Image (tube, rainbow, N blue to C red):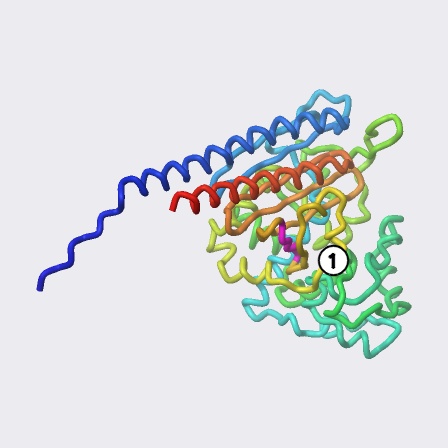
């Protein structure tokens, strides 16, 4: 039997596709170079003591840069291994670890919280029974947003805060409305510890930090203070940024705000979340953590992002945005003296993160503008490709 003549790939089309690909790579590089300039410019303009950022393209670091000092007025520069507090970016690790354990049948998202925390009680007993583990990780417990964070801010002890929940009546049924929590989110910790026999911090280290070679990452205040190459916290005052002491309050809620890491560590976290370390973060896990849960319409009003956001949901420890038609997996963090932001596009295989040792909104503007440029470039490349067909 005669074989059909082989169809040759048209040389002209091959050259066009290659040039388009190279142009896209070149433009991502150009965007990264420009971002570095803006990052340094804006931190200097706003007086932020120090910071670091990384931009990842698929499995490689496209751009990493550091700025300023670990401590205002000090002589030591921030470098790629300087450790910062991640604040609420810690929730991305908790959501991932909990999802791993659900896949391993250690517990179920449908399990009621009271199965593991029988001491947990709301004013309405029937409402208490309805809150499950999925509601904790998905920020949909129905409780008043940031319940008892005010006591945590005042350094109240967690064991004395938990009984206070018996005074609360949910504002909606679990799973119905968005209700951002730090304390209730961290109720996943005793569940994890009971079902694995390990401490939360040791398990995160064993399942995430060590296999991803996040060598400077840790959980908790003791480990942070034991790190010599760490960034000191600074708060904004009328006379500029002022160095303050590291506070222990939010370290009490390790899943919500307990992780410390350098920009080098975060680069490895982004690379894994972009699908490049499937033995640690499986494709199914990466799909599940960004599965849309409750809608977070409040996010659509964020000052620096509202021009670009079309929709927003909470997944499992991650936010999921519709950013100008592109899916963006995102989280930010803010704790006394530090701010952090991390995001990635699963389709475009681009990720970016920033860490600052001074409380400043500049981070939000930088992030929104970066993603706007990336997606604008992608749309332009697609438009050019379509017009050539």
Front in this rendered view, residue 204 or 319 = 319
Q: Residue at x 73, y 40 (%)?
A: 339
Secondary structure of residue under mark 1: helix
In the rendered view, does 387 fall on the left or right side of 316? left
Q: Residue at x 78, y 52 (%)?
A: 252
In the rendered view, does 25 fall on the left or right side of 218? left
Please provide the residue range marked out in magenta. Answer: 317-323
x and y percent of residue 228 in the render? 68, 32
Q: Quadrant of the N terminus?
A: bottom left
Considering only vertical position in the picture, is 40 above or below 212? above
Can residue 343 be seen here? The reply is yes
Residue at image mark 1 = 297
Front in this rendered view, residue 305 or 243 = 305
Based on the picture, tell me whether residue 322 belongs to the magenta stretch: yes
Considering only vertical position in the picture, is 180 above or below 112? above
Based on the picture, tell me whether residue 312 belongs to the magenta stretch: no
State how many labels appear: 1
Q: Residue at x 57, y 71 (%)?
A: 105
x and y percent of residue 344 in the render? 58, 47
x and y percent of residue 300 in the render? 73, 52
């Amino acid at each position: 039997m005669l074989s059909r003549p082989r169809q040759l790939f048209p040389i002209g089309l091959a050259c066009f596709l290659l040039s388009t690909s190279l142009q896209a790579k070149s433009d991502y590089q150009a965007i990264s170079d420009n971002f570095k300039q803006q990052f340094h410019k804006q931190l200097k303009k706003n007086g932020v003591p120090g910071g670091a950022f990384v931009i990842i393209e698929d499995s490689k670091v496209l751009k990493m840069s550091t700025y300023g000092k670990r401590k205002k007025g000090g002589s030591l520069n921030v470098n790629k291994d300087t450790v910062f507090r991640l604040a609420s970016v810690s929730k991305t690790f908790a959501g991932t670890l909990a999802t791993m354990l659900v896949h391993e049948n250690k517990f179920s998202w449908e399990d009621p919280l009271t199965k593991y925390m029988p001491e947990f009680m709301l004013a309405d007993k029937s409402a208490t029974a309805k809150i499950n583990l999925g509601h904790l990780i998905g920020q949909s417990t129905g409780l008043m947003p940031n319940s008892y964070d005010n006591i945590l801010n005042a350094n109240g002890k967690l064991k004395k805060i938990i009984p206070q929940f018996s005074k609360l009546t949910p504002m909606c049924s679990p799973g119905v409305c968005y209700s951002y929590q730090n304390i209730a989110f961290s109720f996943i910790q005793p569940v994890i510890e009971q079902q694995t026999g390990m401490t939360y911090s040791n398990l995160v280290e064993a399942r995430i930090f060590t296999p991803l070679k996040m060598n400077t990452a840790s959980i908790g205040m003791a480990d942070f203070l034991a790190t010599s190459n760490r960034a000191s916290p600074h708060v904004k005052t009328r006379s500029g940024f002022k160095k303050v002491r590291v506070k222990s309050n939010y370290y009490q809620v390790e899943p919500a705000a307990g992780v410390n890491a350098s920009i080098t560590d975060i680069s490895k976290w982004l690379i894994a979340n972009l699908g490049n370390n499937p033995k640690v973060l499986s494709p199914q896990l990466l799909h599940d953590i960004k599965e849309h849960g409750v809608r977070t319409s409040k996010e659509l009003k964020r000052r620096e992002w509202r021009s670009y956001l079309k929709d927003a949901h909470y997944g499992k420890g991650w936010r999921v945005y519709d950013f100008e038609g592109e899916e963006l997996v995102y989280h930010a963090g803010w704790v006394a003296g530090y701010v952090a932001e991390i995001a990635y596009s699963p389709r475009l295989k681009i990720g970016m993160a920033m860490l600052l040792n001074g409380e400043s909104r500049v981070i939000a503007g930088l992030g929104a503008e970066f993603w706007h440029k990336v997606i604008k470039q992608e749309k332009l490349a697609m438009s050019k490709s379509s017009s050539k067909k």
